[in-house]
């Protein structure tokens, strides 16, 4: 899922995402990249383990899985809070411009109905 990070759209309106939200989104991306790197390192460790080091591998694997689970929970919590913030910003935008929001909803509905008919 990709979010637009433009500062203004073609109507001159400012982006819905606040600088704090953008920063948190970038941190979330960095966390996912670090998680991928950690899992890649774990995969390399698994490939290099010999039969004699199976018990050491098992404990290292459990530690790696625990670390990955903790990181996944942290990322999920951050994503949840960021999505909640985006929802609040969208609600504020709808309250500020209700007619524009209704028009946008109608346009999206018309577009989606055209897609689903085919």
Image: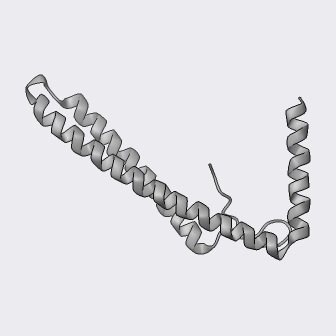
**Residue 109 in the figure: left or right of residue 38:** right
Q: Quadrant of the C terminus?
A: top right
Towards the viewer: 88 or 13:
88
Does the image show residue 14? no
Q: Residue at x 56, y 73 (%)?
A: 20
In the rendered view, would you say 50 is above or below 72? Answer: above
Task: Specify the color scheme.
Answer: one colour
Return the x and y of residue 28 as percentages of the image width and height: 48, 58
**Residue 97 in the figure: left or right of residue 38:** right
- Residue at the limit of the structure toward the bottom, as seen here: 96
In the rendered view, would you say 12 is above or below 53? Answer: below
Q: How many marks?
A: 0
Towards the viewer: 91 or 49:
91
- Residue at the limit of the structure toward the left, as seen here: 52
Return the x and y of residue 78 as percentages of the image width and height: 48, 61
Q: Residue at x 65, y 57 (%)?
A: 3
Towards the viewer: 3 or 76:
76
Q: Residue at x 41, y 57 (%)?
A: 74
Does the image show residue 111? yes
Residue 115 occupies quadrant = top right
Return the x and y of residue 61 as percentages of the image width and height: 23, 38
- Residue at the limit of the structure toward the top, as seen here: 51
Towards the viewer: 31 or 48:
31
In the rendered view, would you say 8 is above or below 47? Answer: below
């Amino acid at each position: 899922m990709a979010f637009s990070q433009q500062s203004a759209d073609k109507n001159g309106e400012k982006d819905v995402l606040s600088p704090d939200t953008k920063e948190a989104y970038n941190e979330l991306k960095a966390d996912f990249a670090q998680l991928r790197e950690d899992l890649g390192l774990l995969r390399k460790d698994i490939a290099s383990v010999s039969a004699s080091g199976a018990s050491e591998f098992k404990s290292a694997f459990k530690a790696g899985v625990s670390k990955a689970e903790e990181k996944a929970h942290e990322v999920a919590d951050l994503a949840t809070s960021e999505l909640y913030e985006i929802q609040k910003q969208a609600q504020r935008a709808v309250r500020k411009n209700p007619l524009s929001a209704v028009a946008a909803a109608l346009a999206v509905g018309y577009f989606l109905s055209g897609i689903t008919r085919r």
